[in-house]
Amino acid sequence: QVQLVESGGGLVQPGGSLRLSCAASGRFFSISNMGWYRQAPGKQRDLVATITRSKSTVYADSVKGRFTVSRDNAKNTVYLQMNSLKPEDTAVYYCNAHILRTILDSNDYWGQGTQVTVSS
């Protein structure tokens, strides 16, 4: 069974930093794209950042220059470094990964979500 386990959320003051981690575990062949999404109360889940296996990245305009996504392929882990946090960054952050369980069988998997609250 494939699982994504997130860590690193919490409460931080405006202007502060947090680092989220998400590790994939279980039996699978490979992981292609990984990324982070977020969902604020009463809003839809939106893309924050994605990273390919070759480490090409895409960011939402709202986080460009403040957030950095990275991954360690050997550890099957994706990270999100969040700097200069703003109250509008408050949301539940979800890790996402496109995982090939076999060479012919792939699916999108989601983490359980981690709360990030930016408040003074």
Image (spheres, rainbow, N blue to C red):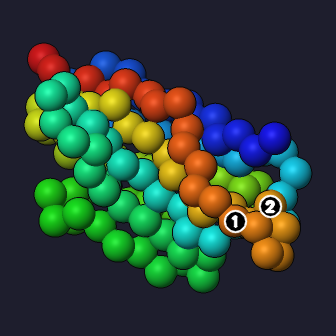
Q: Is residue 64 left or right of residue 73?
A: left
Q: Residue at x 60, y 82 (%)?
A: 54
Q: Tell me: residue 109, above or below residue 65.
A: above
What is the spatial separation of the Cα atoms under label 1 and label 2, in whole angstroms?
A: 6 Å
Q: Residues within 10 Å of mark 2 (few under 14, many from 20)?
A: some
Query: Residue 65, position in %: x, y?
Result: 22, 64
Q: Earlier in the sequence, mark 1 or mark 2?
A: 2
Q: Is residue 32 left or right of residue 94?
A: right
Q: Quadrant of residue 85?
A: top left
Query: Residue 38, position in %: x, y?
Result: 31, 42
Q: Residue at x 79, y 75 (%)?
A: 104
Residue lying farthest to the right in this orientation: 27
Query: Residue 63, position in %: x, y?
Result: 21, 57
Query: Residue 118, position in %: x, y?
Result: 20, 27
Q: Tell me: residue 100, above or below residue 119.
A: below
The quadrant of the image that shows the C terminus is top left
- Which amino acid, by three-letter code, is at mark 2? Arg
Q: Which residue is mark 1?
A: 106
At mark 2, the secondary structure is: strand
Q: Residue at x 87, y 51 (%)?
A: 27
The reply to whether the C-beta atoms of the residues labelled 1 and 2 are less than 8 Å apart is: yes
The quadrant of the image that shows the N terminus is top right
Q: Quadrant of residue 40?
A: top left
Q: Tell me: residue 87, above or below residue 22.
A: above
Q: Determine which of the numbered discs, if any, sits on residue 91 in the image.
A: none
Q: Residue at x 21, y 42 (%)?
A: 44
Q: Tell me: residue 49, above or below residue 82.
A: below
Q: Determine which of the numbered discs, if any, sits on residue 101 in the image.
A: 2
